[in-house]
Amino acid sequence: MIIFTQIFSLNLTDKEKYWLDKNKSKVINVYFYNPNHIYFFQKENGKLGGVYLDFFKKITDKTGLKFNITVKQREDLRNLLKNGEGDIVFNSSRVESREKLYYYIPTLEDKFTPKNEIPVSNSWLSVNKNLPELYSIVKKSTIDFSNSEILESLKKERPIFYKTLLKKDKRVLELRKKYSSIKVLLPPSGDVLPFVYKYKNKNEGYAIDRLNELSFVLGVPLVYTKNSNEKYDIKAVDSSIFAETNSDKYIPYYKIGVAVFSRISENFIDSSEETYSKSVGFVSIENLNSDFLKNISHFEKYIKYKDSDAALNGLLKGEIDYLYGDFKIIYMAIENKYLEKDIKVSGFLGGYATLGFGVPHDVELFELLDIIFPNKLFESSILQSELKFSKKININYEYFLFVAAVLITIILILAYLLKKMFLAQLKGKRITKALVHSFEAANELNDEDTGHHILRVNLYSKLLAQQLKCSSKFINEIGEYASLHDVGKIGISDTILKKPGKLTEEEFQKMKEHVILGKKLIDKMELGTIASNLVLYHHERWDGKGYCSGLKSTDIPLEARIVALADVYDALRQTRVYKEGFSHEKAVDIIQKESGKHFDPDIVKIFLEFNKEFENIFRNN
């Protein structure tokens, strides 16, 4: 059993935030079947691992939800699905009877496949239909869990998964006895981006990552050499076009896409025939076989370069007019030499051969590397996404110094502007606070009971917002602006405001206008949405029978629902010219009876829990 607990913020709808707050102590039960998949598996120590553990960890970090992940047997899982139990269920195929009980979401492996193209027999992620907010949160999270995050998780989990999967494999046991280290032949010419390259004195790249996985599974270290005369166990970059290769023990990992490069001034080409009369260059880290040499015999003049850097230098010096090579390998070399303004892609000629691992001697080593190699689509497509992005391993110091100078200038300008902005904001806050106090004073002069009332409404509202776990910004703003809820009454006649008896229908309609007048005043002051909403909507009712818009339930902004209860409690307690004040107990009883009618039931629950604090605020203020 695994439980994650930690609370962070996530940009969710108000309804989803409200559901999260109500369910902060709830543990979401997640059920899996058959944990022997790279995305979810059981480790040697019995603990669970895989990409989905990172996925649920991220949801926990974003929302604070806690997940209890449990493995079920096939029959138990079928019964659970039949009865509509469990909050989230994995490895569930879509059938009509289940779709009545569960929402279905494509798994991370299928998340970019259109839903109608995914077979119903595939494994799906299903969420109980009793939990629509959870469904929405999980669905958003599968989209939010990016390919780069899946990639990092796969790179972390694959070695552990395969070590667990192959712990009793005879080949693994034999190879551990046979090897104290595995010698890997690297390209003698240097970097072949993005497959093998040196970065900070460490071998990196797609091919190196796969070899490190092999090393981890076997528990045998890798030893690197660039001397092809030494006996080696694995060749990191091999190809069928090389003169010396062992193609019968060859695992391809990349299809070469031939592109033609030239200086900026040269013409674009549509076919290789256009360059037969030109000087051309080829990049090959090894001697090429006779079949390949026959194909390039059409060219009048050609030069073979040992690496991309030498070929690019030859192109710039005019030794060759065009350079043939793999698009990604050459273009990454161009970017690392910052030659984008000097060299261009002049044409594409398609695929010709592949690059891969060569294993010259040991069949068992070849078979094990082939098993570990990411052949499945959901693995290879993510892991090979690394090959789509450039690898910068060299620094352009001139460019770096230029950027640094520009950044320092920008920072100095920003520091000056920020200082001015801070002083302006400080002045603006003082002006706003003065305006708020002015309106409060105007209300107080109009009605001598109002001064204490609006102060208490601020305190009640802030207390409720704190107990509802609202954001600090929300708490601060409602604690400051709740006092303005009736600011519009300064535009209502004293004969109505101070009338000792019941208002006529006409007078009541006039009184209702104070929320519209108040909103106009607040908007002119530019106090923000929270202030505007609590002024305009604090007379709305949970059952929709309030004014001025007839909103109901959660359509009423939370700040208005809070102020509505705070205002009524204080009004019930106050003695006015036309009524005696009620006791605290009587006011609590009235509010409790109005739960679900006048007031939000959840806010009433908070009020009842902290009603003594309300009484203390009334007595002391």
Image: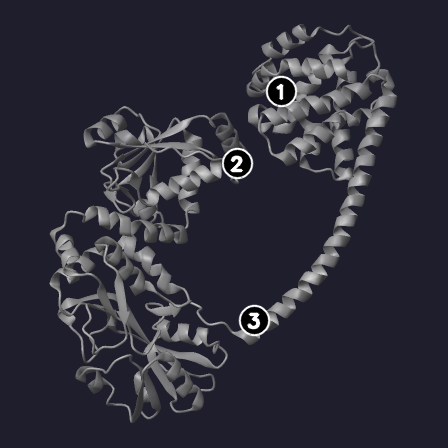
Task: Please state which of residues 354 and 609 is positioned toward the viewer in this rendering.
Answer: 609
At 15% from the left and 72% from the top, the residue drawn is 246
Q: Amino acid at mark 1?
A: Arg
At 39% from the left and 43% from the top, the residue drawn is 142
The answer to which quarter of the image holds residue 2 is top left
Characterize the local packing of mark 3: few (<14), some (14-19) or many (20 or more) Cα atoms within 10 angstroms: few
Task: Please state which of residues 418 and 587 is positioned toward the viewer in this rendering.
Answer: 418
Real-space CA distance between mark 2 and mark 1, rounded to the nearest whole angstrom? 22 Å
Q: Is residue 171 above or below residue 486?
A: below
**Secondary structure beneath disc 2?**
loop
At 75% from the left and 51% from the top, the residue drawn is 421
The answer to which quarter of the image holds residue 446 is top right
Q: Is residue 575 above or below residue 513?
A: above
Q: Is residue 26 above or below residue 115?
A: above
Q: Is residue 563 above or below residue 91?
A: above
Q: Which residue is mark 3?
A: 400
**Secondary structure beneath disc 3?**
helix
Looking at the image, residue 11 sits to the left or right of residue 541; the answer is left
Q: Position of residue 475 (x, y in %)?
A: 65, 31
Q: Which residue is mark 2?
A: 13
Characterize the local packing of mark 2: few (<14), some (14-19) or many (20 or more) Cα atoms within 10 angstroms: few
Tell me which label, 1 or 3, sits earlier in the chain: 3
Q: Position of residue 331 (x, y in %)?
A: 40, 74
Q: Note whether residue 9 is visible.
A: yes
Tell me which label, 2 or 1, sits earlier in the chain: 2
Q: Which residue is mark 1?
A: 541
At 38% from the left and 42% from the top, the residue drawn is 55
Query: How does the figure colour the protein chain or chains?
Result: one colour
Q: Amino acid at mark 3?
A: Phe
Q: Amino acid at mark 2?
A: Thr
